[in-house]
Image (cartoon, helix red, strand yellow):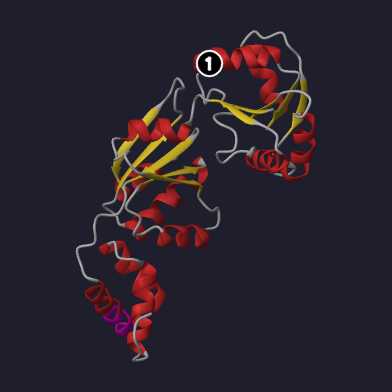
């Protein structure tokens, strides 16, 4: 079978007894970085030296079929560098290929940066949306935030240290400077830090430079306090003042929690004197 195995996200003490046993017995391991897996085996004092197959974002589509065929005859352990495979890490293509081929898939649960950050954030945990890594390009990142302006669930993102300040500035501009945000840094490691505040406060903090592995947790939008008609009216006012329709819809959406698309389409229909879709 294919076995997805969660590895420590920082503290080696979080390696479960099931993970240790699987690593000690595995004959084949598909690893995001074989060097990282070799260090993990050594650090855990595991003498087993299984066959290691590189499985990363650049070759997963091609390697999936090979791993599934191997899994017909032996267990194939799938590891990412940290946390659970297939969650913003290689593994998804292997799982879908295995399911399609009728090969069993199982998991050894364990550490997860997403759930750990969410749990310690102090933000609502009953409903949440994991959005993975934020887009690298500024324009794409802003569009991503615009599409989430009305999202009521707590949102979880991954981000790299050198883009954190810029991403938090975009977040503050689009989702609102007062939106509650938490940045969890170096989770489970020696210098673990959890920063809580508004988007504007954390954007200012990040300007000084931040290092380490990062997770951003963002409070969902508040319930809309304005009607859609009121929101469309405000969009049209902003357009009359010179703003582009798309930008005006995004701004009103971030303030009211109303759907950006509904505001845009409603204002567009109003401008042309047609009924809203």
Q: Which of 156 and 193 is in front in this view?
A: 156
On the question of residue 207 being in view, the answer is no
Please indicate whether residue 241 sits to the left or right of residue 169 in the image: left
Image position, residue 231 (x, y; %):
26, 73
How many marks overall?
1
Q: Which residue is drawn at 67% across and 18% down?
A: 39
Q: Residue at x 26, y 52 (%)?
A: 178
Q: Nearer the viewer, residue 142 or 5?
A: 5
Q: Is residue 146 above or below residue 166?
A: below
Please indicate whether residue 201 sits to the left or right of residue 34 in the image: left
Image position, residue 275 (x, y; %):
34, 86
Image position, residue 126 (x, y; %):
31, 40
The C terminus is located in which quarter?
bottom left
Image position, residue 218 (x, y; %):
35, 46
Q: Which residue is drawn at 47% across and 62% down?
A: 143
Q: Say if the magenta span includes residue 237.
A: yes
SS type, badge 1 = loop
Give the residue at the far bottom of this rendering: 273
Q: Name the residue under label 1.
A: 16
- Crowding near the residue tagged with mark 1, few <14, some 14–19, many ≥20 C-alpha atoms within 10 Å: some
On the question of residue 45 being in view, the answer is yes
Give the residue at the far left of this rendering: 225
Q: Which residue is drawn at 38% across and 54% down?
A: 171
Q: In this view, does 146 lie above or below 78?
A: below
Q: Would you identify the image quadrant in which residue 27 lies?
A: top right
The N terminus is located in which quarter?
top right
Q: Say if the magenta span includes residue 122.
A: no
Please state the extent of the stretch shown in magenta in the rendering.
236-244
């Amino acid at each position: 079978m294919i076995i997805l195995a969660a590895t420590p996200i920082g503290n080696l003490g979080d390696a479960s007894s099931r993970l240790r046993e699987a690593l000690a017995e595995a004959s084949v391991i598909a690893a995001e970085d074989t060097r990282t897996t070799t260090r993990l085996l050594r650090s855990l004092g595991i003498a087993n030296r299984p066959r290691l197959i590189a499985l990363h974002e650049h070759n997963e589509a091609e390697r999936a079929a090979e791993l599934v065929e191997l899994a017909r005859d032996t267990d194939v352990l799938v590891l990412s560098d940290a946390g659970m495979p297939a969650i913003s890490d290689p593994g998804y293509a292997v799982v879908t290929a295995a399911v399609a081929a009728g090969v069993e898939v199982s998991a050894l649960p364990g550490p997860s940066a997403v759930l750990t950050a969410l749990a310690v954030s102090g933000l609502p945990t009953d409903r949440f949306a994991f959005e993975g890594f934020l887009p690298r390009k500024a324009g794409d990142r802003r569009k991503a935030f615009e599409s989430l302006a009305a999202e009521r669930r707590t949102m979880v993102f991954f981000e790299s240290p050198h883009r954190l300040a810029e991403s938090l500035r975009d977040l503050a501009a689009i989702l609102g400077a007062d939106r509650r945000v938490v940045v969890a840094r170096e989770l489970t490691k020696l210098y673990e830090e959890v920063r809580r505040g508004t988007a504007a406060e954390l954007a200012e903090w990040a300007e000084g430079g931040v290092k380490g592995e990062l997770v951003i947790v963002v409070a969902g939008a508040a319930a809309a306090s304005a009607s859609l008609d009121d929101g469309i009216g405000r969009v049209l006012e902003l357009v009359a003042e010179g703003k582009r329709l798309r930008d005006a819809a995004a701004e009103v959406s971030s303030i009211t929690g109303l759907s950006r698309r509904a505001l845009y389409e409603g204002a567009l229909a109003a401008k042309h004197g047609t009924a809203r879709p």
